[in-house]
Amino acid sequence: MNRLRMGIALRRSSVLVLLVGLGTAGWYTFGRGKVVLGGEAVSGEGKLSPVNVETTAPHPGGLDRICVQPGTVEPFECADLYAKVSGFLAEQTVDIGTAVQKGEILARISVPESDRQVEKDTADLKRAEARVEQMTAAISTTEADLGAATAAVALAGEELKSKTSYRMYHLKQRDRLQELHTLRAIEARVVEEQEDHYQAAVGAERAAQEAINASKQKEIAARARVKQAEADRKYAEAEVVTAQSQLKKSQVLQGYTIIRSPYSGVVTKRNFHPGDFIQSAETGGNRMPLLAVERTDVMRVVVNVPDRDVPFVSVGAPAVIEIDALPGQAFKTAGLHKVVVTRSAASEDPQTRMMRTEIDLANPTGTLRRGMYGRVTLTLRSGSASAVRVPSTALVGKAEGGGGSVRVVRDGKVHLVPIRSGIDNGTEVEILNGLTPMDRIIVRASGPLDEGTSVTASDSPTRSNAH
């Protein structure tokens, strides 16, 4: 019985202590006159206290679309110089690091048989040219013979005329004497003598005719000899062309013994020394170049543009290049000197899904070297002049197609403004429409914010205006 009474007394004491505690807490809260409701301060009279927020104004101007990728320096042109013919390296006037000019002789290979071949082909050409001269002289001789034969034909023609006249004279004389003989005015002996003279004249006329035929045949033969001489000269001239071609071929082969620089630049590789036997590159096997030359007055900076930026790459797009080996020095457009995208592959590498893009960079002092690397910043598209920029943290949410919203302060209250966003670089986001530079954007708040929440605004610390 005593134990039961003691348990009841303890329960009553615990309830009393709990009631006293609740009463004390309620009195304290009521006395302070404030409670927290929904993250906002509520006064004892039911009024909400404004939430403290930090705001900033949108910066005018949109964001440029920037692509920042590693870049590698390569020579504008480079060539490995091989030997076309086999022989001994007789002379080499350069070494690695030597500055050379276009066309400068860098090395000579000794190939005696090539020199002898040039000498032989030179002699063959001279012999062929002499043959042409002989044929030219032969043409002159045959043309002279032709002229003589033509003159002989003319002379024979005149001789025939003379013999014909002589024959006609004796014919008339014979006829006249025969009439006299018929009248018995002269003796028959006189008529017979005249007949003999007439027959002799006829024979002389026939001989003159044959002389004409003979002269014409000689003329034809002389004309044929002229044509033959002309044909011989053409053949000799063709032999000259053949000899010239053979000599040029030999000279080309001889020229292969001289290694020249294909352009102005620097020797970057040397694999042989004077006295070494050089194998022709055409022999196959493990080919090794004599020398390597790089053009260095202009360099190519190669950057691989990722797939997402490929559609925006265009020739002439501004670029800024920073080389790790040259700290504090940036290569960019300055005055007439342009640093822009010079060319692009217009095709992505199927393995990397990136597109090779090149920027030509003047290198008059030779500061840039092959293999240097750094960072390339390409401005692919300028920001819209009618857009504004706000901190990325100011976006409440994003939707497909650039949709989203931003909280702004108007008349001391929060308003959720729908916007259409553009580029977001992680620090700033481009707002294409929905905001003006006069709006105050909430970037930070001390408590939850809903549409219409009263706020106390203060300026956010100044941020960079850089794009």
Image (cartoon, grey):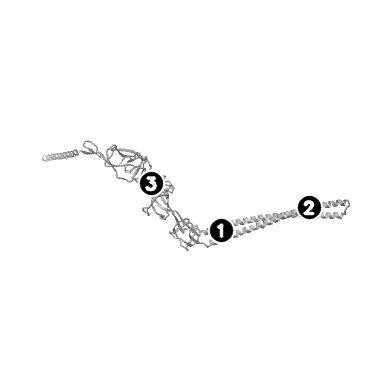
Mark closest to the chain's N terminus, 2 or 1: 2
Residue 34, image x, y percentages: 21, 38
* Lateral position of residue 182 relative to residue 126, left or right: right
Residue under label 1, please give it.
247
Q: Name the residue type under label 3.
A: Ile
Q: Secondary structure at mark 2?
A: helix
Foreground disc of the pair 2, 1? 2
The three-letter code of the residue at mark 2 reads Ser
Residue drawn 84% across the image and 55% down it:
193
Mark 3 = which residue?
66
Report crowding for label 2: few under 14, some 14 to 19, many 20 or more residues within 10 A (C-alpha). Answer: some
Question: Would you say 14 lies left or right of 289 here?
Answer: left
The single residue placed furthest to the front in the displayed view is 335
Badge nearest the viewer, 3 or 1: 3
- Measured in 3D between alpha carbons, the distance from the residue under mark 3 to the one under mark 1, in whole angstroms, is 61 Å
Q: Earlier in the sequence, mark 2 or mark 3?
A: 3
* Classed neighbour count for the residue bearing mark 1: other residues with Cα under 10 Å, few (<14), some (14–19), many (≥20): many
**Looking at the image, is mark 2 or mark 3 nearer the viewer?**
2
Residue 288 seen from this side: no
N-terminal-most mark, 3 or 1 = 3
Q: Residue 44 vs residue 464: left or right? A: left
Cα distance between the residues tagged 2 and 1: 67 Å
Task: Specify whether residue 115 is in view.
Answer: yes
Q: Are marks 2 and 1 in contact (CB under 8 Å)?
A: no
Residue 347 position, x and y percent, is: 44, 47
Quarter of the rendering containing residue 269? bottom left
Image quadrant in which the C terminus is located: top left
Mark 2 touching mark 3, by CB under 8 A?
no
Residue 438 picture location, percent across and down? 33, 40
Q: Nearer the viewer, residue 422 or 352?
A: 422
Give the residue at mark 2: 165
